[in-house]
Image: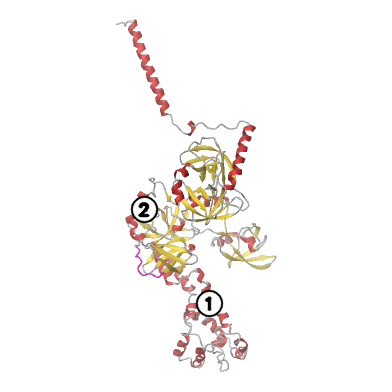
């Protein structure tokens, strides 16, 4: 059947109309679906010629002249950062991680090198925003806070700060760049930043603060700043000294931490804040209800006080130290401390753990990262280049300002012994050096022009671009512990724990303590001494056999007793008659008994005091007053009347009961000779390692 031409035309018109409508709808949808982002924001055009470049330069120089005097360096303990003064009375805007925490004392260094005292106020951790206050009275130059909400890509900007920290004689460093991206909290620029710049100002070409230097990424254009509008929005809280974080669904969020409250309830009662000279240093774990507290040894200085969960503050005595694990045992006068719940089985990789503090919520949570392992030490270095020579290990170069140069080593010196160990070739020398940590003093036997020399060097730390980059990356975040290597065995976990929170117990989901946190090793790792290793160490530490390093010189009372015995120099001139006794003492078999008697006084100091050996003990001035108790010297021995009767029973020797009471008047020397129980310590040491 044939269609009428008019009807056919109408059908075609209807089809065209429908197609037009569909095309319009499709165009609208495609436009709506096109992604929007920074590229949609009109960017500032780049300068086209020298005149326009000159205009930008003039504005940059004006900004520098205006704001550089307001930029400060900030020092809080070992940390270094930057900041900018924003009020005449000394309010300082900085990055949150530079301010550390509210109430932290700080030192501010102005552009001219003058220093001022101050304190941290509020910190918004989620945005990395911080506020501080210079407490020294005065009127300070200050910069004006701008706005960051209307920033456009391509806008020119100026960044100021102290790269790698303040350097004497160097004013704040100026960098120029452009805005690459901007959002509510963060501004990204290509102003090159580095550690130490954090907290410094980012300025527009009107000299107003539009951001605060915060962090960097891997490439040179990944420089991030806290948008200044964050400070405007939270100014009151920052000024009041509050510290808070975003309530985001992170691993360490309040909601997740709250789930651990029941888990850590008992262990949290076994935590103490360890204070040194009034300052919080580290945490401690209560390991004995009668006042025993275990903590990190290398952080302890001065007067030690422990603050407990109930508010009590008790002075602590340092009883023992184990340098291998960096552990210290403290003792306080208490008898009612809680008992700690131990779990002596190592947790498995992936198992939940929580670091416990003085609060109801854990300090940090994470999982066991790797199986039980040892952390090797950083090796010390001398700072020399060596070759194998005809006579031995020959120095081919001594690096400037190295430990070797300070020790007096020179090119062409031949090292024959290192700390008493032979070094026949460079491999042997390197193997011996690897055993020593930076800061260790070693003795070197050197041949120079065929002459033998004895030198002493203090080993340094290897510093290269690679190690510097490693340390910088690991220090980002919460920082690293000062002592963080050379542990015989640890459990490694990924809980983000501040170095100041080391010494805290680590708890598994069963509520039992699986170890004590001993070091923040880096950005991804925290180290914990396992509970089964702690148990073996604790009783040695409590016993007093592992004496603190500071008491070791006191454990050498024998050289100090010699001058105490010498204070009787008046007897010295009277001792010359002793030469008459010396010929009598010529039989050398008796001096041979002296060395035999010397080790015995430490074990049974009273057994060897035979009178015949006393005259031979003249090399020991302490015993001289006992040796010449000849009747003529008895009046001179009056300061020791008890020792006079020692002479008569001496010839009898058999009446040991009389010699025992003579040993009793010298109990003070026993504890002084016993502190040298270094022999016992060595035995305990090796036993512990074997266990």
Name the foreground residue: 233 vs 381.
233
Residue located at (60% from left, 50% from top): 111
Label drawn at residue 557: 1
Tell me: residue 334, above or below residue 369. below
2 or 1: tag closer to the N-terminus: 2
Residue 2 visible in the snapshot: yes
Instruction: Classify residue 517 by image quadrant.
Output: bottom left
Q: Quadrant of the C terminus?
A: bottom left
Asked if the residues shown at circle 2 and circle 1 are in contact, with their CB atoms under 8 angstroms apart, the answer is no
In the figure, 503 relative to 609: above or below? above
Q: CA distance from mark 2 to mark 1?
A: 50 Å
Relative image position of residue 288 (x, y in whole percent)? 37, 67
Highlighted range, magenta = 332-340
The picture places residue 639, in percent across and down from the top left corner, at 54, 87
The spot of residue 227 in percent (x, y) is: 49, 42
Q: Nearer the viewer, residue 278 or 642?
A: 278
Badge 1 marks a residue whose secondary structure is: helix
158 with respect to 308 (left or right): right
How far from the left and from the top, in percent, is residue 613?
54, 87
- Residue at the right extreme of this rendering: 449
**Residue at figure coordinates x 51%, y 31% from the top left:** 42
Q: Is residue 536 above or below residue 235?
A: below
Q: Main secondary structure of the magenta part?
A: loop
Q: Residues within 10 Å of mark 2 (few under 14, many from 20)?
A: some
Quadrant in the rendering for residue 23 = top left
Instruction: Say left or right for 12 vs 235.
Output: left
Q: Give the residue number, with chain letter if any, for mark 2.
A: 352
> Is 183 included in the stretch rendered in magenta?
no
> Would you say residue 620 is visible in this rendering?
no
| Residue 478: mark in rendering | none
Q: Quadrant of residue 66?
A: top right
Q: Quadrant of the N terminus?
A: top left
């Amino acid at each position: 059947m044939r269609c009428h031409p008019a009807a056919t035309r109408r059908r075609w018109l209807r089809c065209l109309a429908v197609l037009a409508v569909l095309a319009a709808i499709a165009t609208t949808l495609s436009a709506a679906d096109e992604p929007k982002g920074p590229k949609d924001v009109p960017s500032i055009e780049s300068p086209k010629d020298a005149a326009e470049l000159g205009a930008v330069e003039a504005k940059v120089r004006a900004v520098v002249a205006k704001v550089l005097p307001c930029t400060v360096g900030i020092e809080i303990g070992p940390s270094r950062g930057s900041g900018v003064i924003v009020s005449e009375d000394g309010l300082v805007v900085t990055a949150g991680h530079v301010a550390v925490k509210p109430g932290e004392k700080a030192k501010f260094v102005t552009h001219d090198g003058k220093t001022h005292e101050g304190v941290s106020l509020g910190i918004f951790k989620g945005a990395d925003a911080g506020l501080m206050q210079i407490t020294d009275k005065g009127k300070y130059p200050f910069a004006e806070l701008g706005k960051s909400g209307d920033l456009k890509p391509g806008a020119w900007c100026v960044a100021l700060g102290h790269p790698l920290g303040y350097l004497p004689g160097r004013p704040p460093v100026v960098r120029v760049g452009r805005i690459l991206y901007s959002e509510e909290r963060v501004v990204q620029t290509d102003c090159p930043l580095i550690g130490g710049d954090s907290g410094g100002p980012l300025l527009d070409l009107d000299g107003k603060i539009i951001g605060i230097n915060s962090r960097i990424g891997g490439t040179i254009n990944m420089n991030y700043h806290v948008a200044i509008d964050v400070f405007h929005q939270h100014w009151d809280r920052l000024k009041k000294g509050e510290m808070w974080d975003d309530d985001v669904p992170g691993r360490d969020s309040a909601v997740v931490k709250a789930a651990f409250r029941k888990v850590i309830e008992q262990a949290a009662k076994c935590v103490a804040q360890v204070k040194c000279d009034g300052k919080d240093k580290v945490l401690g774990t209560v390991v004995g209800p009668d006042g025993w507290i275990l903590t990190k040894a290398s952080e302890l200085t001065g007067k030690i006080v422990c603050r407990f969960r109930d508010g009590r503050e008790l002075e602590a005595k340092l009883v023992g130290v184990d340098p291998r694990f960096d552990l210290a045992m403290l003792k306080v006068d208490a008898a009612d401390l809680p008992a700690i719940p131990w779990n002596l089985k190592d947790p498995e990789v992936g198992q939940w753990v929580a670091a416990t503090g003085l609060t109801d919520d854990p300090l940090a949570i994470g999982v066991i990262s790797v199986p039980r392992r040892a952390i090797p030490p950083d090796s010390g270095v001398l700072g020399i280049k060596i070759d194998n020579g005809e006579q031995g290990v020959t120095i081919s170069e001594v690096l400037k300002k190295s430990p070797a140069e300070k020790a007096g080593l020179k090119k062409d010196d031949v090292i024959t012994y290192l700390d008493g160990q032979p070094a026949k070739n460079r491999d042997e020398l390197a193997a011996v050096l690897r055993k020593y940590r930076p800061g260790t003093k070693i003795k070197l036997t050197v041949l120079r022009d065929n002459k033998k020399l004895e030198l002493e060097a203090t080993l340094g730390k290897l510093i290269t671009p690679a190690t510097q980059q490693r340390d910088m990356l690991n220090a980002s975040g919460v920082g690293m512990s000062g002592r963080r290597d050379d542990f015989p065995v640890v459990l490694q976990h990924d809980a983000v724990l501040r170095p100041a929170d080391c010494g805290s117990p680590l708890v598994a989901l069963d509520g039992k303590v699986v170890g004590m946190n001993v070091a923040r090793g880096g950005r991804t790792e925290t180290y914990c001494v396992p509970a089964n290793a702690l148990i073996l160490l604790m009783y040695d530490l409590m016993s007093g056999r592992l004496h603190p390093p500071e008491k070791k010189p006191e454990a050498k009372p024998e050289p100090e007793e010699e001058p105490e015995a010498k204070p009787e120099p008046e007897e010295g001139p009277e001792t010359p008659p002793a030469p008459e006794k010396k010929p009598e003492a010529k039989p050398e078999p008796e001096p041979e008994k002296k060395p035999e008697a010397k080790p015995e006084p430490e074990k049974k100091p009273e057994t060897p005091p035979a009178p015949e050996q006393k005259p031979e003990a003249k090399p020991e001035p302490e015993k001289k007053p006992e040796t010449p108790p000849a009747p003529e010297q008895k009046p001179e021995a009056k300061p020791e009347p008890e020792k006079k009767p020692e002479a008569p029973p001496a010839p009898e020797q058999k009446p040991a009961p009389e010699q025992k009471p003579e040993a009793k008047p010298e109990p003070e020397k026993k504890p002084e000779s016993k502190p040298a129980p270094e022999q016992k310590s060595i035995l305990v040491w090796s036993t512990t390692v074997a266990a």
